[in-house]
Every structure is written in C-alpha cells, then in structure tokens.
Image: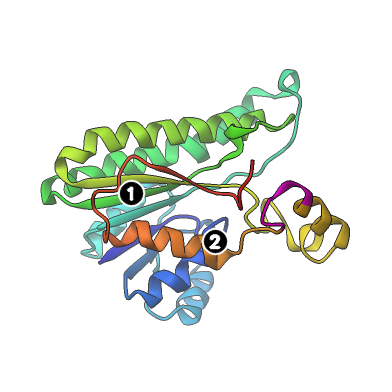
C-alpha cells in the first residue's frame, strides 16, 4: 500500500517512518529539505524502502507521484510551522498568512488533488496531524491554535463528504509530543526543571515518544478498521 507523508523530518514524521516501513508500506516522503539531492540520497540510505520526493507544493507533489506511477492509498498530513508567541493585538498579518498557508491551505489543497482518485477507487485514507491545544488555549499561541483547529474542522467536513466513497478521514491531535520544533530535548527532557514542568501538566508525567505517535498513525493508515472515520484522537498523555 502506498503512503504519502509530509514534513517527514518534523513533528510526527520521525516516529512514523520506521513504523510505516516496518509494516511494509511503499512510503513516499515529502520534506522541505528534499529540494537538495544530497538530502534525498541521505534519507533513502537511512530508511531503505522510503522514497524522498523532490516536490514541495501540493500540485508538484501530485505531479511527481503521477510521474512515478504511484497511486496513493493513504495521505498523512503532517503539517508544521514555527510557533512564535505573541499577544493577539501584536500579530502581524504576514505571520497569520504564513501559518494559514502552511497549516491549512497546504493540506486542503493536497486533499483536493488526491481525493478524486480515492473516490474513484472507493477506498483510501487521510490522517491529519493537527493539535489538541484548542482544548485549553494558551496565551500567546492564538495563531497556531486557531489555524490547527480550522484544519481539524476541515478534516471532519472531508470525512463526511468522503465516507460514501469508502474513504476514511481521521485526525490525530497531539500535545506534549517530543519534537525539536515544539518541545525540544534540551529543555524538556535533558533539563530536570523542564521535566518537572511537563510532569506537572501531563498526567502520564512525561512527553509523548515519537514511536508512540507513530504506532497510532500507522494504525489509522492501515485500513484495518474501515468503520473508523471522522474521529479526532487526542495524543496528550491524559491532558488536559
């Protein structure tokens, strides 16, 4: 089964790749670093069986997949954008637009391009990796929180429209997942004060591990439970 995952070096990507390859998927990977041929070569050597795609935007990804003769059965929308904490009144329009483009417009457009083939085949899966922050918004993070919530809402709308065609759509909503972009190791794992901060907030007392979210995503990508669609599954260690 062919799987496409975006932003493979970030967020849920590092934990998902080994599990998806273990499950013997044909794994096509997008990452911003893959414009560089050496980066693509290194990745494919590190992860035998994975394909590093050069394409960056949704249309280019669809075109490259078609050129390679790959019919994607599962799309893992693992979208990322830097969090820059600011009070609402200080958010510049350019920051809002950049987050909108990366976290909402990109996955919406990719879904538009890949959905018709799934509907024609009457099977397929989308897994959107968004965020659980909307459940307890934090001051300063209104941009990421609101736009990821919009992506979650889009996924739920897509689930309703795609269900009659046998296409599953589900959301994984993390918070307190270890990643260098959002919860870096130096601050939240190696530093005792950071570990204590996480333990005070997360009932399980630690950050989520990359391989743990990888197992959840791989299950949703597998098609083993085709009646599961339109669900938002929190990956939060019991928070909030």
Give residue 139's position: percent from left, percent from top: 74, 29
- Residue 114 visible from this viewpoint: no
| Local SS, label 2 | helix
State yes or no: residue 204 in magenta.
yes
Asked if labels 1 and 2 touch by Cβ distance under 8 angstroms, the answer is no
Span colored in magenta: 200-205
Q: Main secondary structure of the magenta part?
A: loop
Foreground label between 2 and 1: 1
Q: Nearer the viewer, residue 150 or 230?
A: 230
- Residue at 63 percent of width and 45 percent of height: 239
The residue carrying mark 2 is: 33
Write down the quadrant of residue 85 in the picture.
Answer: top right
Q: Residue furthest top?
A: 89
- Residue at 69 percent of width and 50 percent of height: 202
- Residue 102 visible from this viewpoint: yes
In the picture, the disc for residue 126 is: 1
Label 1 Cα crowd, 10 Å radius (few <14 / some 14-19 / many 20+): many
Write down the quadrant of residue 134 in the picture.
Answer: top right
- Residue at 12 percent of width and 51 percent of height: 121
Give residue 8's position: percent from left, percent from top: 50, 61
Q: Quadrant of the C terminus?
A: top right
**Above-or-below relation of 95 to 183:** above
Which of disc 1 and disc 2 is earlier in sequence?
2
How many discs mark residues in the rendered view?
2
Write down the quadrant of residue 82 in the picture.
Answer: top right
**Above-or-below relation of 104 to 21:** above
Q: Is residue 29 left or right of residue 33?
A: left
Give residue 187's position: percent from left, percent from top: 81, 58
């Amino acid at each position: 089964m062919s799987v496409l995952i975006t932003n493979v070096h970030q967020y849920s990507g590092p934990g998902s790749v080994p599990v998806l390859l273990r499950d013997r998927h044909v794994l096509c990977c997008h990452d911003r670093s893959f414009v560089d041929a050496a980066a693509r070569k290194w990745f494919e050597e590190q992860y035998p069986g994975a394909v590093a795609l050069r394409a960056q935007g949704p249309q280019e990804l669809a075109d490259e997949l078609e050129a390679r003769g790959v019919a994607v059965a599962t799309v893992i929308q693992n979208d990322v954008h830097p969090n820059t904490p600011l009070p609402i009144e200080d958010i510049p329009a350019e920051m809002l637009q950049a987050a909108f483009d990366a976290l909402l417009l990109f996955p919406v457009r990719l879904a538009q391009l890949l959905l018709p083939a799934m509907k024609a085949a009457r099977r397929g899966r989308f897994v959107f990796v968004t965020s659980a922050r909307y459940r307890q918004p934090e001051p300063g993070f209104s941009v990421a929180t609101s736009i990821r919530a919009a992506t979650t809402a889009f996924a739920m709308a897509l689930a309703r429209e795609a269900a009659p065609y046998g296409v599953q759509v589900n959301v994984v909503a993390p918070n307190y997942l270890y990643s260098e972009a959002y919860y870096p190791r130096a601050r939240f794992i190696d530093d005792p004060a950071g570990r204590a901060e996480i333990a005070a907030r997360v009932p399980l007392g630690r950050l989520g591990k990359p391989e743990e979210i990888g197992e959840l995503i791989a299950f949703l990508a597998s098609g083993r439970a085709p009646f599961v669609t339109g669900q938002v599954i929190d990956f939060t260690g019991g928070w909030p």
